[in-house]
């Protein structure tokens, strides 16, 4: 039995969780899905957070999503203090959170524990995905070093999020995670490959894969247990 932990039952976490459950079934891969989210369903979420309906408004997102998918729920915030407990037993971490501090924390905590990470993000018309194998591929911090300065990049609440793009990126996150969990696969020969940054521009229809070089000075990669 493999365990996948999904951070955020939002625009990315909902389609990622659904697609990962189905992909694992298709591969005959026994999977325990853990969904982590501290928030409650809001009416404004319903256009893109596909696991929720009107009747779920006001309920904890993690519990509703877990109930619909036969998963486990953790109504909790991913922080330095909760990371060890939330990542216990994880074979892969899918990060669909929407703030920079949590994304880098997820990167750092996953690497420090040797847990493969699938990072996804959507903002406006653009989306991105990076799967990381600790000790083998570049990570989020090899690429960006750290979060952008406050105010340099608009938040999802300011720039908006293209709902269908959440489905595309979330489902691709699930595929990347399934490949990482499925030891029978030669993961480096199949897209989405770990260590490659995939970007979507839903307005122009351009996808630009970018190989992420390992930074020898990366603080997160330096914490990978050898
Ligand atoms: Zn790194």
Image: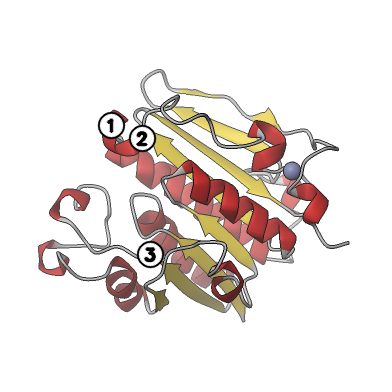
* Residue found at the very far right of the displayed protein: 226
Q: Which residue is mark 3?
A: 37
Q: Earlier in the sequence, mark 3 or mark 1?
A: 3
Q: Earlier in the sequence, mark 2 or mark 3?
A: 3
Image quadrant of ligand 1 equals top right
Rendered position, 60 above or below 179: below
* Total number of numbered discs in the rendering: 3
Q: Which residue is mark 2?
A: 155
Q: Secondary structure at mark 1?
A: helix
The mark found on residue 191 in the picture is: none
Residue name at image x 27 percent, y 56 percent: 50
Q: Which residue is mark 1?
A: 158
* Picture coordinates of residue 127, whole percent (x, y): 45, 34
Q: Compute the Cα span from label 3 to label 1.
A: 21 Å
Rendered position, 9 above or below 137: below
Rendered position, 12 above or below 53: above
Q: Compute the Cα span from label 1 to label 2.
A: 5 Å
Q: Residues within 10 Å of mark 3 (few under 14, many from 20)?
A: many
Visible residue check, residue 51? yes
């Amino acid at each position: 039995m493999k365990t996948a932990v999904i951070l955020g039952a939002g625009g990315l976490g909902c389609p990622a969780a659904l697609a990962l459950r189905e992909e694992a079934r298709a591969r005959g891969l026994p999977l325990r899905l853990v969904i982590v989210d501290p928030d409650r369903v809001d009416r404004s979420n319903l256009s893109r957070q596909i696991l929720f309906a009107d009747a779920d408004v006001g309920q904890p997102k993690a519990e509703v999503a877990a109930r619909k998918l036969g998963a486990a729920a953790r109504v909790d915030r991913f922080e330095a203090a909760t990371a060890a407990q939330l990542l216990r037993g994880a074979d892969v971490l899918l990060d669909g959170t929407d703030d920079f501090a949590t994304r880098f924390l997820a990167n750092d905590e996953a690497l420090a524990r040797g847990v493969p990470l699938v990072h996804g993000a959507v903002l406006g018309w653009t989306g991105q995905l990076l799967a990381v194998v600790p000790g083998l591929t570049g990570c989020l911090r090899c690429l960006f070093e750290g979060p952008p300065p406050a105010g340099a990049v608009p938040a999802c609440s300011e720039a908006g999020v293209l709902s269908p793009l959440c489905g595309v990126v979330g489902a691709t996150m699930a595929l990347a995670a399934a490949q990482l969990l499925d030891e029978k696969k030669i993961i480096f020969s199949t897209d989405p490959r770990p260590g490659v940054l995939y970007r979507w521009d839903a307005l122009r229809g351009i996808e630009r894969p970018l190989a992420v070089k390992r930074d020898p000075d990366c603080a997160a990669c330096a914490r990978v247990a050898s």
